[in-house]
Image (spheres, rainbow, N blue to C red):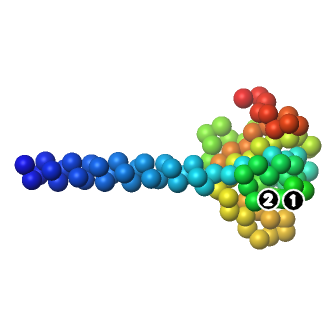
């Protein structure tokens, strides 16, 4: 009986930890939209056009890694394309500022609506 009770308590603890981690992952994801002003080998230089839920000001230029965690990877992009970038909210103090972990990059139209998905 004690073993069964202990197993149930452990199961609830594990479920609680997994649920908390899932909520934290979503809370840390922020996004913005912008236009590509430069394409480098491993990153994009993007000018923010809509800060959405990020702390990036409109007009800010940021360095966005093409190495995204999304299974979809980084789409084929050209200069002046509109993109929505989702990342963990971290911005490194560099020139230009560089984003932390980039979750996804999606091509959008000028209004921020995803295209090609």
The answer to whether residue 68 is visible is no
Which residue is rendered at x = 76% and y = 49% of the image?
Answer: 52
Q: How many marks?
A: 2
Where residue 55 appears, as percent x and y from the top left, is 75, 59
Q: Secondary structure at mark 2?
A: loop
Where residue 75 appears, as percent x and y from the top left, is 76, 38
Q: Which residue is mark 1?
A: 60
The answer to whether residue 29 is visible is yes
Q: Which residue is mark 2?
A: 56
Where residue 71 appears, as percent x and y from the top left, is 61, 39
Q: In the drawing, does residue 30 fall left or right of residue 112?
A: left
Q: CA distance from mark 1 to mark 2?
A: 7 Å
Which residue is rendered at x = 84% and y = 65% of the image?
Answer: 96
Where residue 31 appears, as percent x and y from the top left, is 72, 49
- Is the C terminus in the top left, top right, bottom left or bottom right quadrant? top right
Q: Is residue 71 above or below residue 44?
A: above
Observer-nearest of 78 and 41: 78
Q: Quadrant of residue 111?
A: top right
Residues tagged 1 and 2 counted as in contact (Cβ below 8 A):
yes
């Amino acid at each position: 009986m004690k073993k069964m009770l202990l197993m149930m308590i452990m199961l609830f603890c594990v479920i609680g930890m997994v649920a908390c981690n899932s909520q934290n992952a979503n809370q840390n994801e922020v996004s913005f939209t912008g236009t590509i002003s430069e394409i480098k080998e491993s990153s994009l230089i993007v000018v923010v056009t809509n800060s959405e839920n990020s702390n990036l000001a409109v007009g800010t230029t940021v360095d966005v890694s093409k190495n995204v965690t999304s299974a979809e990877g980084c789409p084929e992009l050209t200069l002046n394309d509109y993109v929505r970038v989702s990342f963990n909210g971290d911005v490194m103090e560099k020139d230009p500022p560089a984003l932390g972990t980039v979750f996804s990059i999606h091509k959008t139209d000028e209004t921020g609506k995803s295209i090609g998905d």
